Amino acid sequence: MFCMWIPRRSDLLIALALFAAPAQAAPLTVLAPASAAAGLASLAAQYTADTRIATAVGGGSRANVLGALKSGPADVVVLPSNDMAGLPNVAGMTSLGRIAVGVAVKAGAKVPDISTPEKFRAVLLAARGVAYADPSAGTAGKAIDAMLQDPEFKAVRRVPVQGLAVTALANGTASIALQMLPELAADKDVALAGPVPESYGATVDFSAGIAAVTNNATGAEAFISYLIDPKNAAVWRKGGLEPLHH
């Protein structure tokens, strides 16, 4: 019996990008905040090895990503979905997955047990201060602030921070930091307690889009297809993002 193999769209796009690329193909520039950088960096390296198209990931903070997007050409942009929605300099939006908010203390301090909602709540109520990004700065701060609006957290000593929540651990204004889990995991100056219990829904959805000012829209589309390929789900999870495509 004869069976015809039908390639996936992502495989076709990557194959076309490779076939169409000259020996020195135009590199791809990917902008992303630190919270999504771990998985992206690994996948960019794999993509470069597969296609011979140099793919660089940069950005740092959300503000840096938005600034780089305005100041010059880029190709792929990864941001929290709520931050990306409506951006005039990004075309299209492809959902990638979600990243959990994590809990950390200063390195050397006793790591609290937050394994249940009850224990997590008790840790926050007992804290000298609970630091998190100012809600006006972006989606992560808004998600955390929304959780803390629950009456059960009314007595929590909140410490909104301009910038990274962990800075409040360093200066002593807080003993607990709530921040994106991959950022905390990569910070050697803090001890990670784990993610906020799932029942609180403290997660941030992330998406990828194509920069409006790009020199390689076809290559950008191929790379985004590569990002959502189910075969790359394990890489995303290792980097702290739970993929939607698996």
Image (cartoon, grey):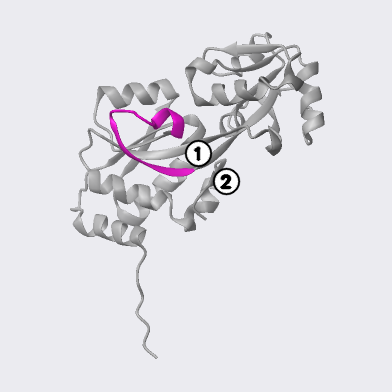
The type of residue carrying mark 2 is: Lys
Query: Residue 85, how many percent across, how many down?
Result: 39, 31
Question: What SS does tag 1 mark?
Answer: helix
Does the image show residue 94? yes
Cα separation, mark 1 vs mark 2, equals 8 Å
Give the magenta-colored segment's residue range.
80-96
Q: Which mark is residue 74?
A: none
Query: Residue 242, how many percent across, how many down?
Result: 56, 45
Residue at coordinates 75% horizontally, 11% vertically from top-left?
128
The answer to whether 191 appears left or right of 122 in the picture is left
Query: Residue 93, how many percent across, how many down?
Result: 37, 40
Q: Quadrant of the N terminus?
A: bottom left
- Image height of 138 relative to 6, above or below: above
- Residue annotated with mark 2: 238
- Image height of 203 relative to 13, above or below: above
- Image quarter for residue 127? top right
